[in-house]
Amino acid sequence: MTQIQEVSIDQFKHLVSERAIRGETMLLNMGPQHPSTHGVLRLILELDGETVVNCISDIGYLHTGIEKNMEAKTYQKAEVMTDRLDYMNTMGNNLAYVMAVEKLVDVDVPVRAQALRVILVELQRIASHLVWLGAFGLDLAAMSVFLYCFRERERILDIFEMVSGQRMMTTYIRPGGLWRDVPVEFEKAVRDFVNMFHKRVDEYERLMTRNPIFIDRLVGIGYLDKKTALSYGVTGPTLRASGVNWDIRKATPYLGYEQYDFNVPVSDDCDTYARYIVRIQELRESLKIIEQAMNKLPLGPVRSENRKFVPPPRSEIGVSMESLIHHFKLWTEGFLAPKGSIYNAVESPRGELGVFLESDGGPKPYRVHMRTPSFDNLAVLPEITKGHLVADLVAILASIDIVLGDIDR
Amino acid sequence: MVIIMDKKLEPIVKDLQDKFNVTYEEHRGEVHCFVKPEQIVEALTLLRDKHQFELLSALTAVDYYPQNNPRFHVIYQLTSLEKIAFIQLRVPVNGDNPKVPTGTGVYDTCNWRERELMDMFGIEFENHPDPRRILMPEGTEGHPLRKDFPLGYEEPQFTFNFEDIDVRKPYAKE
């Protein structure tokens, strides 16, 4: 183990302006322990007075080697690692990985499982946007929004606990379907939440959307034009706030998203306020999807019958020798995926969450790459903060909605 | 002659074939084109400007150790928002001195993604504007996602061997 070197100005010489080297501007360290960086992100700011001349992001403080660890586990066991990536979007991460595995081995998923997946993923989207909204308000010194948002998020986490036994690290969506069917109380809990939440979104909007201080701080701040956004690979609500109508749920529908009637909020204003508006509207659109999915939730199995990839139900193991063998093989060796590689992307609350899987024909993935949206969304930060005040940088950083677990993997 | 399931991609692959003599394969509806390292910047520029692949979705690599030539595949996953089309470019790279020209001039997202590959696989991107490690700390030895890099673990300490392991266990230095 080598000694970890200290970071010095010499490493950033090519990134800062001449004036910083002459000592006319100041280099200031923001983070890694700073409440406004939403985790362990370190920003090295070059400041002229209070104006940001340059901003250098230093990431990797939360790097846990998830991609490397997944190579050493079977396909089913590697799924547990995906929860830890973007801890605000656990169901969505499970879904992205599981859909990639299903595409690789070619398993069909029953319609009930697909509808339930849609409901859970959209609930997760609401929960993730609620955390974002709360933290966004907190960064702009609006404390009460944070408390309200976390109150509602708790209801969603209760639903997750009801179905999977876990509030956050769910691993509920499994290759070939779901871990098990939802309990009978699920329907009432989701309907109660949906009925209650319509009014709550109005409440948040009354607190923030037309708030003059809020508008003063956000309008015209952090202008991100369409071309820069696309070049930097920015996706999700941040891209849609720059006037690009791109949502993977609409472009290449998966899980039967084409059956649901919902809009993709887009704004041409390209600033921090637009990013806020797009996300608030997405809360309502997600609610619409959940309502429709609940109304036509089909009955039937929630797991594929393909026993080569999906374990049999517990009740069968006692009476069927084949089921016992399948169960044993799947939980010891795992299933063998055919050779080849696939890339599958889904729309996470932050953008395009893509999973690249390469298989060498064995029971473990040869290479997993998670294309996480926050990574590219953060890379654009220096472009959009130049010339703004430090206080605005906090608002911009909050508006692009990063999760450090998603960036560092 | 190019025959692909997704008809939108046929003229694009044909164009790539005419200009860069690429080979392609189709797997589960995805098209993978194999491009030589020295041609990748031109191929990316062509795809972005002529065929509206505005978004470089993912940039990653696979290590095929112990095979050495090619040892790595650098993978560019491109998305066209206009046509709703997806194409993958694969660049086979030699294991002895892995080098690919940087794509930062074409897509800005290459900057961080290439730094990640430099960090994780030790693939050098020529003329990269900011060739520093991105995830691992400065001064780390080796490239963790290479297949010959061991997956590390911490030895569990029990009462009978606590002292023995404690001697060789790495702690953070003062």
Image (tube, coloured by chain):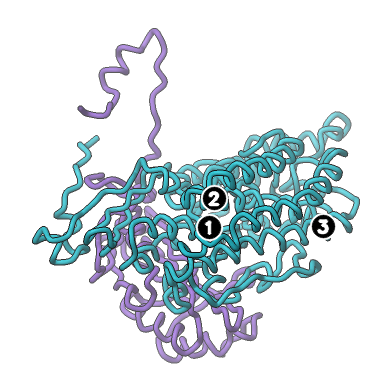
Report the Cα–Cα distance between label 2 and label 1.
Answer: 6 Å
Q: Which residue is mark 3?
A: A291
Q: What's the CA distance linking mark 3 and mark 2? A: 37 Å
Q: Which mark is residue B144?
A: none
Q: Which chain is purple?
A: B
Residue occupying the point 81% across, 33% down: A314
Which residue does the image show at 50% across and 85% down from the upper left?
Answer: B52
Where disc 3 sits, the SS reads helix
| Dot 3 amino acid type | Glu
- Mark 3 neighbour density, 10 Å: few (under 14) some (14–19) many (20 or more): some
Chain at numbered mark 2? A
Quarter in which the N terminus of chain A is drawn: top left
Residue A163 in the image: x percent, y percent? 76, 39
Quarter where residue A281 is shown: bottom right
Relative depth, front residue between A34 and B80: A34
Determine which residue is flagged by label 2: A365
Q: Position of residue A49 (x, y in %)?
A: 22, 59
